[in-house]
Image (cartoon, helix red, strand yellow):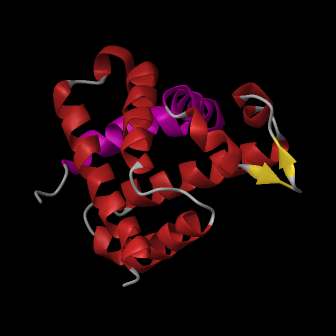
């Protein structure tokens, strides 16, 4: 796989990272729209959320959004050396597998990430920027999928 275009990724991430909670909420709202079956996977203190809005406004889930945005930030920071994150991402994959996330759901997460970037960046979200993010996300998923392979 070709390495993603680092400068396009960094430049676009600077705009998103100014409001990580706001943009992370857009990502997860889109994720729940596309794959509502993921909502029951998010339970805190044995509490099942009745709606995506209920989930997206809970303090525990907002903390999850912050963590996801930090992982994306780490990938952006290490875009030229993603191998440095391989073990961490594989461990993250194992954690997601343990709570019932299916590997196939990462495709929907990728669509939701691109949607969030497009909403945040508007016309600055060019085809080249989309391609760079798709490559970066693909590399992250490849590393996380090792958590399903048992490697």
- In front here: 38 or 8? 38
What residue is rendered at 37% in x and 67% in y?
145
Please state the horizontal and vertical placement of residue 81, each as a whole percent of the image. 27, 69
In this picture, residue 106 sits left or right of residue 79: right
Count of marks, rendered view: 0
Choose top left, top right, bottom left or bottom right for residue 58. Answer: top right
- Specify the principal SS of the magenta part: helix
The residue nearer to you, when weighing 90 against 63, is 90
Q: Quadrant of the C terminus?
A: bottom left
Q: Which residues are magenta?
A: 5-34
Q: Give x and y (percent) for residue 91.
A: 50, 76
- To which quarter of the image does residue 89 belong? bottom left
Q: What residue lies at 37% left-to-right and 34% top-to-bottom?
A: 111
Q: Is residue 131 left or right of residue 29?
A: left
Residue sitting nearer the eye, 114 or 70: 114
Q: Is residue 96 above or below residue 84?
A: above
Q: Residue furthest bottom?
A: 151
Q: Residue at x 71, y 49 (%)?
A: 42
Q: Quadrant of the N terminus?
A: bottom left
Magenta stretch encompasses residue 31:
yes
- The correct choice, above or below, for 41 with respect to 111 in the image is below
Q: Is residue 33 magenta?
A: yes
| Image location (x, y in percent) of residue 70 | 56, 55
Q: Quadrant of residue 22?
A: top right
């Amino acid at each position: 796989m070709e390495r993603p275009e680092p400068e396009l990724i960094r430049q676009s991430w600077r705009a998103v990272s100014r409001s990580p909670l706001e943009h992370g909420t857009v990502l997860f709202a889109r994720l729940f729209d596309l794959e509502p079956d993921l909502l029951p996977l998010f339970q805190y203190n044995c509490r099942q959320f009745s709606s995506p809005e209920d989930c997206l406004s809970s303090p525990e889930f907002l903390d999850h959004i912050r963590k996801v945005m930090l992982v994306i930030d780490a990938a952006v920071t290490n875009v030229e050396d993603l191998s440095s994150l391989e073990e961490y991402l594989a461990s993250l994959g194992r954690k997601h597998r343990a709570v019932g996330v299916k590997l196939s759901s990462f495709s929907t997460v990728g669509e939701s990430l691109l949607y969030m970037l497009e909403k945040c960046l508007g016309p600055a979200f060019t085809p080249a920027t989309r391609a760079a993010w798709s490559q970066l996300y693909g590399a992250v998923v490849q590393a996380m999928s090792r958590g399903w392979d048992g490697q």
